[in-house]
Image (tube, rainbow, N blue to C red):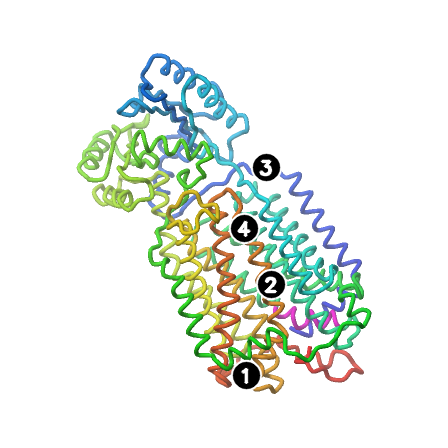
Amino acid sequence: MATFLYKLGRSAFRRRRLVALLWVALLAVAGIGAATAPAATSSSFSIPGTEAQRAFDLLEERFPGAGADGATARVVFKAPEGQKMTDPAHKAVVEETVAALRSGSDQIVSVTDPYTAQAVSQNGSTAYVSVAYKVNAMELTDATREALTEAGHDAQGKGLTVEVGGDALQTMPETGSGEIVGVVIAGIVLVLTFGSLVAAGLPLLTAIIGVGIGVSSITALANVLDLGSTTSTLAMMIGLAVGIDYALFIVSRYRAELAEGREKEDAAGRAVGTAGSAVVFAGLTVVIALVGLAVVNIPMLTKMGFAAAGTVVIAVLIALTLIPALLGFAGDKVIGRKQRKGTAKKSDKPNGGTRWARFVIRRPVMVLLVGVLGLGAIALPAASLEMGLPDDGVKPTSTTERRAYDALSDGFGPGFNGPLLVVVDGDKATADRTVSTIKGLEGWAAVTPATPNKAGDAAMITVVPKDRPSSGATETLVHDIRNATGDDVLVTGATAMNIDFSQKMNDALVPYLALVVGLAFLLLTVVFRSILVPLKAALGFLLSVVAALGAVVAVFQWGWLGSLFGVEQTGPIMSMMPIFMVGVVFGLAMDYEVFLVTRMREAYVHGERPGEAIVTGFRHSARVVTAAAVIMIAVFSGFIGMTDQMIKMIGFGLAVAVLFDAFVVRMAIVPAVLALLGHKAWWLPKWLDRVLPNVDVEGEGLAETAPGQAKPDLVKV
């Protein structure tokens, strides 16, 4: 592989104009495709194989045109202190609003009158109007949303407090300035690392080009492939992080090769042949982790994984081709000014990476214990993990959706924000028996009479729980209804969907872990030609991801330091968070493992003792790995500033996971374990050594690629 990549790097350097033109053309084509593609009109969410999904499918079949999975809204009215919503003046305002809503859009299925639908609180202070739409939230037109908000504003000006909630107001997540700040921090770190604006600019430029191609392609295909709004955000998040990191490693190796006195074209080839090999395998681990999300069998999650994996593939290809091409254009400017003028002073003093590695080697047991116990302590909150999907209750109090949520809870009880929809596949007698059965259970606040369809062969029943949607009592009620009724009765609604989704996530976690860790273990065994090194890498990852999950629970569920991260309301952790963090963080964690440990193995196979190889690996890689980790943390942290709770949580989780994995696991625990193992770390059974392909990540084959040159010492770079 190293020889092939060496030739690829030299070819890209030599034909830099053609390579750069091809990538710019690809960016232009993707941009034009995104600009001309029809806007995504659908972002369906389905959970195949669950009872909640079967109920939705039955509703669509037996209640055609009812918009079973359509958007909903609630316009909540609150009377001034001491007055009631049943007062004639207030009642007239509500009826005007109902009429305005009914005539405001042809996408509306129904608008309920609170005075005929028993939607006035017992003390009379609160009332609400339910609005159902034919299509889901992403298919609502701007005119429909405007009609909804205007109806609320008109009523607000007539003496009532009016708030609007529901997913009908759902829009694309607002992006804050955090992403820009993350890129700026990345630029500063690169300048400090390289001492050259040109060298610092190359990783940023290529990462932006890669993300531009990836996100534009997702936008162009969003309508055709039914891609959700968070798909492009995830692709941007991961694409920026790995794009900068991969380019950083190749540019760093190129500068090291130039420092050895090599010609520029040869240096570019060797940088791609050595660091590029690590980029390929690091990228493969990320792709495996993301594509493996398909095991969960949630279409939305599968599409997110494949889209992000595509962006990672683009980042790898750009690092292998566009970076050497741009290095050809950069010339000597990729080196710092002092080095170009020959005024830079060479120092024989050990750098920070060398000093740290020697410290770890002297005290491996202490470093190992501190690292493991520290991450273990941070992981403790993960034992209290409660999972669910975010609703209006976790939105900032400045939003009308959150205020509507709170008003309904105050006026009607917490369960009113998460009603259950019971679908009966049978006649009226069956539906009536179901209502009686449900009323015999505990945990419900209201049960409506059955509403049959026109054919009389199905009915809907609404059950309002006593407790909030994400509570354990509500989950118990869902299971009790399912256990007490027959197979012809199905429970659905947002709350039941959340419960089924969480269960599906739990069931898929172990098979997913086995698949991803197993494939990556095989891949790393090929790369490092060792059994214990890949095993250590996988165990270290599990420690860092559980610690990161513990930090997420502490901040978003318990509220520790919540105000610092913009968490206004604590609640359950997003159901997909554990399995999502496993997928993404595993791939990213293996980046540092590959980049750091390949330099150690490179030194070891060239004759250095295990301890010396650890020091050599840190001397050459620690500074660059540290810069890469800081950049990735900065990029992920930028997404904490977004208003969308799910994106905020993902950004925080990935940022702390990279922090723990890079600086505690890879920089401390890994060298400590390798120091304790000694030669055994690189042991591989002879029969397995014969079976495994030799991918030559260390660049042994490059010794013969430049006729007339002395065989290079691949360690002294």
**Is the Cβ of the residue at disc 1 closer than 8 Å to that at disc 4?**
no
The residue at 53%/71% (across/down) is 667
Q: Nearer the viewer, mark 3 or mark 1?
A: 1
Which residue is identified by label 3?
39
Which residue is identified by label 4?
234
Label 4 to label 3: alpha-carbon separation: 19 Å
Viewport quadrant of the C terminus: bottom right
Circle nearer the N terminus (3, 1): 3
Q: Nearer the viewer, mark 1 or mark 4?
A: 1
Q: Position of residue 301 (x, y in %)?
A: 47, 50
Q: Nearer the viewer, mark 2 or mark 4?
A: 2
271 magenta-colored: yes
Circle nearer the N terminus (2, 1): 1
The one nearer the camera, 529 or 154, is 154
Which residue is identified by label 2?
628
Residue density around tag 3, few if under 14, some if 14–19, many if 20 or more, within 10 Å:
some
Circle nearer the N terminus (4, 3): 3
Label 2 to label 4: alpha-carbon separation: 19 Å
